Amino acid sequence: MKILILGGDGYLGWPTAMHFAARGHEVAVADNLGKRFWEAEMGVTPLFHIPPLQRRVRIWNEMKRGPKPMKLYIGDIAQNHRFVYHLFEDFRPDAVVHYAEQPSAPYSMVSRLQAVSTQVNNVSGTLNVLFAMKRYTPAAHLIKLGTMGEYGTPNIDIEEGWIEIEHKGRKDRMLFPKQPGSFYHLSKVHDSHNIEFACRIWGMRSTDLNQGVVYGMETDETAMHPELLTSFHYDEIFGTALNRFAVQAVAGMPLTVYGAGGQTRGFLNIRDTLQCVELAAMNQAKEGEFRVFNQFTEAFSVMDLAHKVKEAGEALGLNVAIANVENPRIEKEAHYYNPKNTALFSLGLKHHPLTQDVIMGMLKKIMSSRDVIDRATINPTVKWRKS
Ligand code: USQ
């Protein structure tokens, strides 16, 4: 297949591009390098130095692992519709994997500027992609990275995107109600609505992958060459819970459990993200279908996660403490959580569970860069409600 990866410079986009190329697909990556700007704006860097995207693509192509060299397009899908149209006219993908969004909830809550730019970037980029697909590749499959955070934590079971509702004696199948917890998570809700509309009105086909919190940094392809690694964050803005806890354990800082720590979320290994996206691509949605898969493999509370990291760290001789810090977010710290996630498993997903070995593997890798951890970027300062 011809597969276009939007957001190919990111934590998940780059490993996804190599994953498809290594399996014989013709791959193109597009990126505006915006994540590198947002990192500079916030004064944070990934734990490991990430070479320019152009260099990583060149190194990959010199290894001759795919049927054709990976193509690279640098441009902004949100602000430059001519770039988007050129991309689709030139490459003509069969499937589009869309990661090209501002990915951080805390970033979107810094101030008005970041809230607006997150939603303008994410929502306009997706709209431009929908129009370009309609024009040049109407039969192609849009695989969009959404988030489990679109649903929030309702006091009822969470279905995969759709719910049958009976109201005053009548029934209908409707999009599952959303209660997102940040302007970032809201941007993904707006995307979901726009994509569902395009499927219903134009007959497009799409899979919305409502992904949980991803952890890990290594895939089969990132391990092939030291410069093919992917971006790994631990700072308060772009670092996610488990990745942060692992770095905090190595840095000898207490693990920052926000509030009571009963917040429960779906999690998955980065290797399983690649597997899920591949399963979606190989089993495409039907014409006019807006399909939603809940993409996580296991659910844990934040406190459970902290204890797992503590145990793994102590097995490696680290002295790990857990701290209940004041929660910078507004979220329920104890709640019902029962989301369904059977669709990807029924397509054949074989997941990597979060074992002590997996966490120890992450800790060992992080220990090799212990000296460059910027401790000043770890504790949360971005608050949902300004005091
Ligand atoms: N948390 C802590 N301590 C920390 C960091 C986070 O207790 O040091 C808690 C948060 O309060 C929250 C939970 O851990 O309850 C998850 O936070 P997170 O920062 O790991 O993840 P989140 O902000 O929800 O966003 C991340 C990705 C986002 C993706 C989302 C999936 O950045 O792109 O959409 O995970 S989900 O969480 O399922 O919505």
Image (cartoon, rainbow, N blue to C red):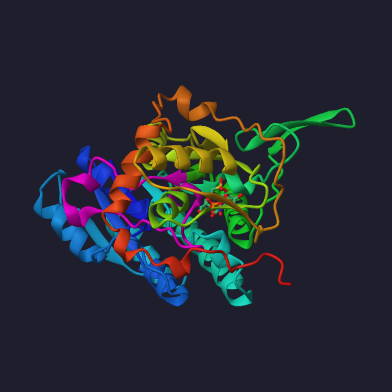
Is residue 290 something that shows in the picture?
no
Residue 242 lies, in percent from the top left, at: 47, 47
Question: Which residue shows up at 24% across the image and 67% down it?
Answer: 52
Question: Which residue shows up at 54% across the image and 36% down it?
Answer: 294
In this view, the residue in front, 125 or 60, is 60
Residue 228 lies, in percent from the top left, at: 22, 54
Question: Which residue shows up at 45% across the image and 37% down it?
Answer: 311
Residue 5 lies, in percent from the top left, at: 34, 52
Instruction: Reply above or below: 82 against 240.
Output: below
- Report the label total: 0
Residue 251, located in which quarter of the rendered image?
bottom left
Question: Which residue shows up at 34% across the image and 45% down it?
Answer: 362
Q: Is residue 226 left or right of residue 206?
A: left
Magenta highlight: main SS = loop
In this view, the residue in front, 275 or 46, is 46
In this view, the residue in front, 356 or 197, is 356
Of the 4 image quadrants, the one containing the C terminus is bottom right
> Which residues are the magenta region?
214-243
Instruction: Reply above or below: 172 against 150.
Output: above
Is residue 65 something that shows in the picture?
yes
In this view, the residue in front, 272 or 257, is 257
Of the 4 image quadrants, the one containing the N terminus is top left
Q: Is residue 218 magenta?
A: yes
Q: Is residue 226 magenta?
A: yes
Q: Is residue 205 left or right of residue 364?
A: right
Residue 274 lies, in percent from the top left, at: 36, 40
